[in-house]
Amino acid sequence: MLLTVEKEKLDQGEVAICFDEEGLEFLIEELSKLREKRDHRHLMTPSWSGNELTEVPQGGDSYELCNSLRLVSLPSSN
């Protein structure tokens, strides 16, 4: 499985989420869990005691790896 979160080094406004087919399926499953129950999920690299994110950067030299991604499901603002 391949799933990384990387931020652009120079432009702090851009984030790249890189994945293969298995990583995409995993991400969809995690998001689906948050649809069923309002909560949050932590995805981390092995360096941060996780196994959900991989540590080999995929976005190129202008990106640096993020070790943690928190997915947060918020209530509707209706």
Image (cartoon, rainbow, N blue to C red):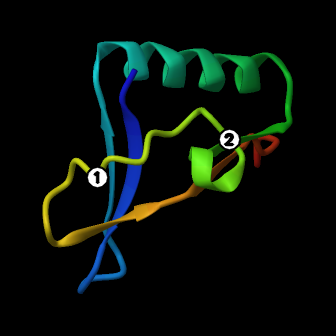
Residue 29 drawn at (x, y percent): 59, 15
Q: How crowded is mark 2: few (under 14 residues within 10 Å), some or many (20 or more)?
A: some
Residue at 68% x, 41% y is 50
Residue at 85% x, 23% y is 37
Lower position in the chain sequence, tag 1 or tag 2: 2
76 sits left or right of 47 in the view: right
Give amino acid for label 1. Answer: Pro
Give amino acid for label 2. Answer: Gly
User: Quarter of the image containing the C terminus?
Assistant: top right
Residue at 62% x, 26% y is 31
Find residue 57 and name its label. 1
Residue at 14% x, 68% y is 61
Is 62 drawn above or below residue 23 in the view shown? Answer: below
User: Quarter of the image containing the N terminus?
Assistant: top left
Q: How crowded is mark 1: few (under 14 residues within 10 Å), some or many (20 or more)?
A: some
Find residue 19 and name its label. none
17 sits left or right of 27 in the view: left
Q: Which image quadrant is residue 60 in? A: bottom left
Is 42 drawn above or below residue 68 in the view shown? Answer: above
Residue 64 drawn at (x, y percent): 33, 68
- Foreground pick, 61 / 7: 61
Is 59 drawn above or below residue 18 in the view shown? Answer: below
* Alpha-carbon span between mark 1 and mark 2: 16 Å
Question: The residue tagged with tag 1: helix, strand or loop?
Answer: loop
14 sits left or right of 78 in the view: left
Q: Which image quadrant is residue 3 in? A: top left
Which residue has dot 2 on it? Answer: 50
